[in-house]
Image: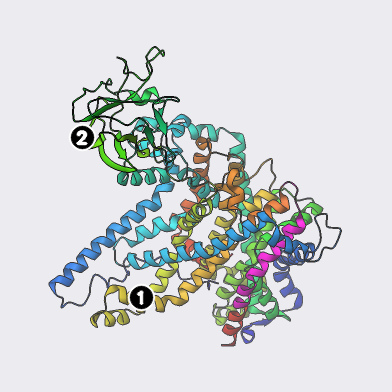
């Protein structure tokens, strides 16, 4: 288990240790030369690795702009030297396809409530665990921590049956509830640990001012929990947005979210990359935007929650 | 558990109203299903008759589930090891460059995208045709740099002609050759487009003391040519290796020129001529990544692509807390970088490496999307993993939810040790 840390792990280049470059001053020529040479080797290796890591995504990106006939006949790298192969027509036809645009809305309609619900319910419970005294508290919290690593696979069959009885099998509401339930153990664990660090004096002062529990929760605890809530929100959002398995089983097959809609387009031998490539790229847009905009929160969220 | 810290002894209904919504959801959708799955795993497909542990026996005896088990084992060993090792290497290397952040962003980026998108990306990377798939484009480029590809993969002897196909794929002229009498080695079946640019075939002169001959495409358009004779329109096959073989030994060797002719020294007199199979091997077409043999390693590679960044960032954070003085002291003592890495850095990082490894193991245990998306249905059975089998057993055609539940319980059992470690750590922290 990764202990949830609320300090971000993204290294800051300004503070990056430079010890390897700034070794102890008295050095012989030969060892300095060796250091320079090994530095160059390291740089070259890293550049090669970086390019290698980028190529698959670059291939998807470039392919999404190519004509189906071009995709079927040559590799995407051919388009780098032939600007004539680039066009928006794949995107035009995809965005004109009502089934796909509908799936975008389904994804949003699942992701936003599932994120909000986990934050609200998780924060309420975490506050109770952190600052209220009630019988069975420690024991209950142990159960929650135990549930952290329960694989969602265990719940697929029983919950499908339960949702059938409740009449919410293959509905957006069902998917939202499923994701919320499986997001809760992590949410409660992360937020309780964070809330527990709030100085007791702050809470007591607020209480002396006559604040009730709810007011205390909304005015003091929630604002102070900002960083943890942000990390949690991003983690849960990405998790739900990118999910395919839960949606495959619990979402309405007639108006599925993007991941399932694209999965249904897969063929035995992918000949329809003119649909899959732009579609996959569109599903990646929001997660990538969040990743680049909120690197710190994203990394700390992923680091803390990866155990899921 | 920090009980002394609680500010209020909450009135029961206050605590309950804060807790109930979350606990209800957890109870109904997480705790109750665990119990239900355990019970359901002991019943047959219909759910009516009790079968004891038969469903669990099925996991270890059913061929397709055993493949899934075996693959899961490969996944659990290989994927975390490779991802952690790469993460360690990346973390150590990036310590030395100023643009480390850029590199880390690039490598970490795949964590943000869905496994479906990653699956589509790698379906494209792994396309069989080297003209389209990146992996095979690279593989064939590397291969062809080191091994020359043959020029006439389709050429064959005419059935009933003077050449016969040997067991090793080479073509043999059964009649021994004599110096001064030109040998004719006609081949057929080369597609027209491959012949564009070939010169007309020429009948060799019969120089005494030398063995000469021609290798050519013995076919005239319209079929008007004479068999086993060089007609005016017929084209030469250049660049073909010709060996003279006597008693199984190669005594001389030559290569055909642009006009299809070759000349062997006098030693070849009385030997048999052979066109070795290298001349006719099909061009290297890369690896069948998504075929039954390597589909699992290929999918594991895509997983490593996604998760190496995770390992790298966690390990880099651990690395930042390794005391600089210790490393410097070792360097001053004359230890080289490799020794410092092996003797100091890695041991100090051991706890972090352990956390990364276990986290990845739990993650890999439940791998589903990548396999479901990348493996084409023709090799899905070969790429099978437990979570995929569970999905197929539970919701596929001919579903047996008894077996599905048994797989679910099996997965749950596998994470119980981690659950216990978590609880122990929590208890320890609270005692402090």
Q: Which stretch is magenta?
A: B397-422
Quarter holding the N terminus of chain B is bottom right
Q: Is residue A286 above or below residue B267?
A: below
Asked if residue A191 is positioned above or below residue B177 in the image, the reply reads below
Residue B365 vs residue A212, the one in the foreground: B365
Residue occupying the far left of the picture: A29
- Disc 2 target residue: B266
Q: Quadrant of the C terminus of chain B?
A: bottom right
Q: Is residue A185 left or right of residue A273?
A: right
At 32% across and 44% down in the image, what residue appears? B147
Magenta run includes residue B85:
no
Mark seen at residue B150 = none
- Magenta portion: prevailing SS class: helix
Mark whose residue sits in front, 2 or 1: 2
Percent coordinates x, y for residue B254 in the rendering: 25, 35
Residue B420 % position (x, y): 63, 77
């Amino acid at each position: 288990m990764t202990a949830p840390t609320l300090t971000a792990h993204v290294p800051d280049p300004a503070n990056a240790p430079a010890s390897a470059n700034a070794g102890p001053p008295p050095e012989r020529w030969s060892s300095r030369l060796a250091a320079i040479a090994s530095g160059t080797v390291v740089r070259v290796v890293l550049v090669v690795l970086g390019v290698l890591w980028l190529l698959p995504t670059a291939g998807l990106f470039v392919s999404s702009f190519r004509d189906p006939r071009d995709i079927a006949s040559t590799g995407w790298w051919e388009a780098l030297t032939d600007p004539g192969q680039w066009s928006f027509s794949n995107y035009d036809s995809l965005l004109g396809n009502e089934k796909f645009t509908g799936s975008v809305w389904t994804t949003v309609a699942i992701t936003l409530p599932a994120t909000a619900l986990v934050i609200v319910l998780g924060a309420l419970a975490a506050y109770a665990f952190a600052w209220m005294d009630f019988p069975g508290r420690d024991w209950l919290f142990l159960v929650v921590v135990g549930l952290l690593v329960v694989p969602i696979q265990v719940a697929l069959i029983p919950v499908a049956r339960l949702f059938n009885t409740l009449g919410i099998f293959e509905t957006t509401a069902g998917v939202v509830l499923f994701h919320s339930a499986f997001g809760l153990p992590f949410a409660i664990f992360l937020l309780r640990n964070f809330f527990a660090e709030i100085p007791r004096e702050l809470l007591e002062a607020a209480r002396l001012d006559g604040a009730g529990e709810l007011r205390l929760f909304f005015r003091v605890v929630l604002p102070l929990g900002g960083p943890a809530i942000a990390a949690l929100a991003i983690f849960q959002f990405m998790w739900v947005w990118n999910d395919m398995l839960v949606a495959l089983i619990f979402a309405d097959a007639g108006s599925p979210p993007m991941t399932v809609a694209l999965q249904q387009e897969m063929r035995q031998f992918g000949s329809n990359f003119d649909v899959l490539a732009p579609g996959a790229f569109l599903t990646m847009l929001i997660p990538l935007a969040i990743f680049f905009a909120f690197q710190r929160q994203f990394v700390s969220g992923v680091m803390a929650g990866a155990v899921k | 558990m920090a009980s002394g810290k609680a500010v209020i002894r909450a009135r029961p209904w206050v605590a309950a109203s804060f807790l109930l919504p979350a606990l209800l959801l957890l109870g109904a959708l997480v705790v109750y299903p665990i119990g239900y799955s355990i019970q359901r795993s002991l019943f047959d497909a219909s759910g009516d008759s009790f079968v004891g542990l038969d469903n669990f026996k099925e996991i270890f005896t059913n061929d397709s589930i055993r493949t899934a088990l075996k693959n899961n084992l490969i996944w659990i060993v290989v994927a975390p090891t490779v991802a952690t090792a790469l993460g360690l290497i990346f973390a150590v290397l990036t310590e030395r460059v100023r643009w480390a952040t850029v590199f880390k962003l690039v490598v970490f980026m795949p964590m943000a995208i869905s496994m479906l998108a990653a699956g589509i990306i790698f379906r494209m990377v792994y396309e069989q045709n080297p003209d389209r798939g990146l992996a095979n484009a690279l593989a064939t480029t590397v291969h062809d740099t080191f091994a020359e590809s043959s020029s006439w993969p389709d050429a064959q002897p005419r059935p009933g002609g003077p050449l016969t196909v040997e067991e090793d794929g080479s073509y043999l002229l059964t009649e021994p050759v004599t110096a001064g009498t030109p040998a004719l080695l006609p081949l057929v079946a080369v597609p027209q487009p491959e012949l564009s640019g070939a010169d007309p075939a020429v009948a060799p002169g019969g120089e005494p003391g030398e063995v000469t001959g021609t290798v050519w495409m013995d076919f005239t358009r319209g079929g008007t040519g004479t068999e086993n004779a060089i007609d005016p329109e017929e084209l030469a096959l250049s660049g073909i290796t010709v060996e003279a073989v006597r008693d199984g030994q190669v005594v001389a060797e030559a290569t055909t020129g642009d006009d299809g002719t070759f000349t062997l020294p006098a030693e070849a007199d009385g030997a048999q001529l052979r066109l070795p199979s290298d001349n006719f091997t099909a061009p290297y077409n890369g690896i069948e990544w998504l075929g039954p043999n390597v589909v699992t390693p290929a999918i594991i590679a895509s997983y490593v692509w996604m998760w190496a960044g995770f390992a790298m960032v966690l390990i880099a954070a651990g690395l930042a807390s390794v005391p600089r003085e210790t490393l410097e002291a070792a360097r001053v003592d004359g230890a080289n970088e490799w020794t410092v890495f092996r003797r100091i850095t890695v041991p100090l990082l051991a706890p972090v490496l352990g956390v990364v490894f276990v986290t990845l193991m739990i993650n890999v245990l439940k791998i589903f999307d990548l396999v479901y998306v990348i493996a084409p249905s023709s090799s899905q059975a070969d790429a099978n993993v437990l979570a995929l089998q569970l999905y197929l057993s539970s919701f596929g055609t001919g579903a047996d939810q008894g077996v599905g539940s048994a797989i679910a319980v099996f997965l749950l059992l596998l994470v119980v040790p981690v659950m216990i470690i978590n609880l122990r750590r929590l208890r320890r922290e609270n005692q402090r």
